[in-house]
Image (tube, grey):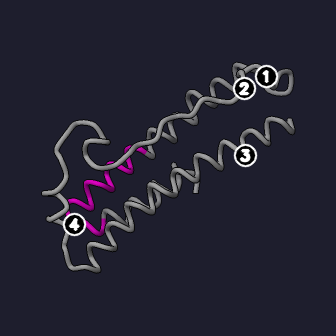
Amino acid sequence: TQVFSHSLSALSFLVLTQVQQHTSMALRSLVARKSLGLGFQSKAKILAVGSTAHSRGFQTLSLPDLPYDYGALEPAISGEIMQLHHQKHHQTYVTNYNKALEQLHDAIAKGDAAAVVKLQSAIKFNGGG
């Protein structure tokens, strides 16, 4: 149980660090442009149009592999439960975070400040903050 707790804490720290970096970059970009009086539309013209998140100017997260086998914590926690939590539950948070990040990017490009504020809770919840 102690190994499990330590591994999850380390993994959570790594994911949270990535999330905070992505979120703060997006929000800093918004604040900087508003401070400089550049407006939102200039950013939309600069960004390349593409179907992937990276080509649109932001990076998404992916589910990291566990540093141990799903069954490594048996009998305290079954491998099946570990696999379910990692592949389903944790993956859902990552997927929803990426969706919120894309919506944030779109809201910034459109100049929709209300949407930017509204997305903060989804980013925080799904990003683990």
Residue at 71% across, 45% down: 10
Q: Assess disc 4: are there few (<14), some (14-19) or many (≥20) residues with their C-alpha within 10 Å of its C-alpha.
A: some
**Magenta stretch: residue 62 in it?**
no
Secondary element at tag 3: helix
C-alpha gap between disc 3 and disc 2? 14 Å
* Residue 32 marker: none
| The N terminus: image quadrant | top right
Residue 65: x and y, percent? 60, 29
Q: Amino acid at mark 1?
A: Ala
* Front tag of 4 and 2: 2
Instruction: State which tag comes first along the sequence, 4 or 3.
Output: 3
Which residue bears the numbered disc 2? 68
Q: Quadrant of the C terminus?
A: bottom right
Residue 82: x %, y % from top left: 69, 26
Number of marks in picture: 4
Q: Which mark is residue 111?
A: 4
Q: Which mark is residue 72?
A: 1
Tell me, yes or no, whether the two marked residues, 4 and 3, touch with CB atoms within 8 Å: no
